[in-house]
Amino acid sequence: MTPAISRFPVPALLDLPQDLQQALLAVQEKAGFVPNVFLVLGHRPDELRAFMAYHDALMLRPPSGPQGLTKGEKEMIVVATSGANRCLYCVVSHGAILRVYEKNPILADQLATNPLKADLTPRQQAMLAFALKVSLDSATLVETDFDALRAHGFTDEDAWDIGGIAAFFAMSNRMANLTSMRPNAEFHLLGRVPRAPKAG
C-alpha cells in the first residue's frame, strides 16, 4: 500500500477550482507529474494560490544585477535551509531541481547534509551562511552579516533575495512537516542519471 502524501485530506486535481486546475495541469505538462506540494496545499485553495504566487515572485524573479542569484543558487538556498530544518519533501524535490540546474548529481546531497563540506565557491558559502542564519536564527542578524555578503559582490537587493527565499522556505518546511508531506517518487532519480536519448 502506498503511504498517503498528507495527514490531511487531499483533493483530486479535478476537484480544485478551475484556475488552480489549469495551473497544475500546466505544471504536469511541463514536468510530467504534479508535485505533491500543490495537491497537499490544495486542501485550502486560497492558501495554495498565495503560496504559488509568492513562490514564483521569489524563484522566478530575474537577477537584481550581473552578480545576482542564478536559478541554481536559489535552489542551493532551498536545499541547504530545508536540510537544516529537516524537511524531507523540500530536500528531495528541490534537490532534484538543483541537480538538473547545476548538472551535478552530488551537490544537493552535500548541501542537505552539511553545507560547510559542499563543493561551493566562497561566494556561495557566504550566501548560504546568510540564508541559514535567516532560516534558523534571524533575530541575531546584524550589519556584519550584510557586510559579509557585500564582500563577495552581493548587493542589499541580493540580500533580500537570499533572505526572502530562506524565509519563505522556512514556512514551506514547516507546512511540509505539519502535513507529513511525501515527495513524489519521480523526484528521487531526477538529475541523478543521464536522460535516455529521444527516439528519432
Image: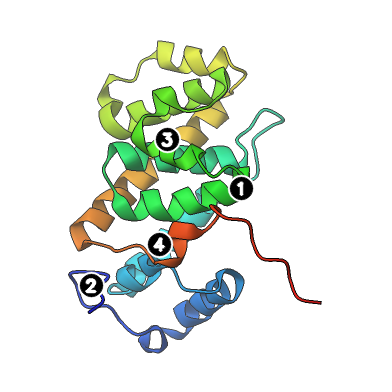
- The residue that disc 2 covers is 3
- The residue that disc 4 covers is 50
Task: Identify residue type, mark 3.
Answer: Leu
> The residue tagged with tag 2: helix, strand or loop?
loop
Q: Residues within 10 Å of mark 4 (few under 14, many from 20)?
A: few
Q: CA distance from mark 2 to mark 3?
A: 27 Å
The image shows residue 127 at horizontal and vertical percentages of 49, 26
Task: Identify residue type, mark 1.
Answer: Tyr
Q: Earlier in the sequence, mark 1 or mark 3?
A: 1
Q: CA distance from mark 1 to mark 3?
A: 15 Å
- In front here: 56 or 76? 76
- The residue that disc 1 covers is 101
Q: Earlier in the sequence, mark 2 or mark 1?
A: 2
Q: Quadrant of residue 117?
A: top left
Q: Is 196 left or right of 149, judged from the image as shown?
A: right
- In front here: 98 or 48? 98
Task: Between label 2 and label 1, give the one nearer the viewer.
Answer: 2
Q: Is residue 61 visible?
A: no
> The residue tagged with tag 3: helix, strand or loop?
helix
